[in-house]
Image: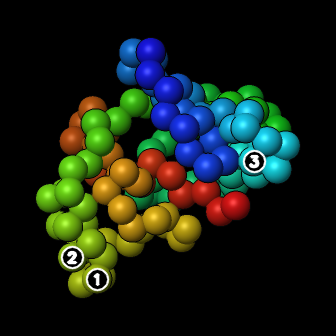
Amino acid sequence: MQIKKGQTRWTILIFNLAFKIPSLKSWGRFVNGLLNNMYENTHPHPGVCPIIFKIPGGFVNVMPRCTPADELDYNRLAWMVEGEEIEIPPYVELKSSSFGYLSNGRLVALDWARY
């Protein structure tokens, strides 16, 4: 098990799954984490990691665990976005840690939250 802590959510990686839960660091971050999970639930996009299970209210989003993109992958992605060869969802931070590969090799955005 591995835990990655972001500003508003924590991602718990267990086997081949990623569980996104609201941050417990403060009330404000917790509420924003709930809102971010709900946003990802209600704004699907072909370029993002799919949600395979969720608990209503934004308490948990479960996604397939992805292989992280490295800096070279990110540079290629940034070039493709700039050249408008692919479309990424709104609110994705353009940095390598925001992207990963599904088990089928498809590059997807891992975090497309708004708050």
Q: Is residue 6 left or right of residue 26?
A: left
Question: Which mark lies nearer to you, 1 or 3?
Answer: 3
Q: Assess disc 1: are there few (<14), some (14-19) or many (≥20) residues with their C-alpha within 10 Å of its C-alpha.
A: few
Q: Indicate the amino acid at tag 2.
A: Trp
Q: Is residue 97 visible?
A: yes
Q: Residues within 10 Å of mark 3 (few under 14, many from 20)?
A: some
Disc 1 versus disc 3: distance between alpha carbons?
32 Å
Tell me which amino acid carries mark 1. Answer: Glu
Mark sitting on residue 79: 2
Instruction: Measuring from the top left, give residue 102's x and y in whole percent.
Output: 31, 38
Real-space Cα distance between discs 3 and 2?
Answer: 33 Å
Q: Do the CB atoms of the residues marked 1 and 2 lie less than 8 Å apart?
A: yes
Q: Position of residue 9 (x, y in %)?
A: 63, 41
Report x, y in % for residue 14. 45, 17
Q: Secondary structure at mark 2?
A: helix
* Secondary structure of the residue carrying numbered label 3: helix
When the figure is inspected, residue 17 is found, relative to residue 108, above or below; the finding is above
| Dot 3 amino acid type | Arg
Q: Position of residue 103 (x, y in %)?
A: 27, 32
Dots 3, 2 in contact, CB < 8 A: no
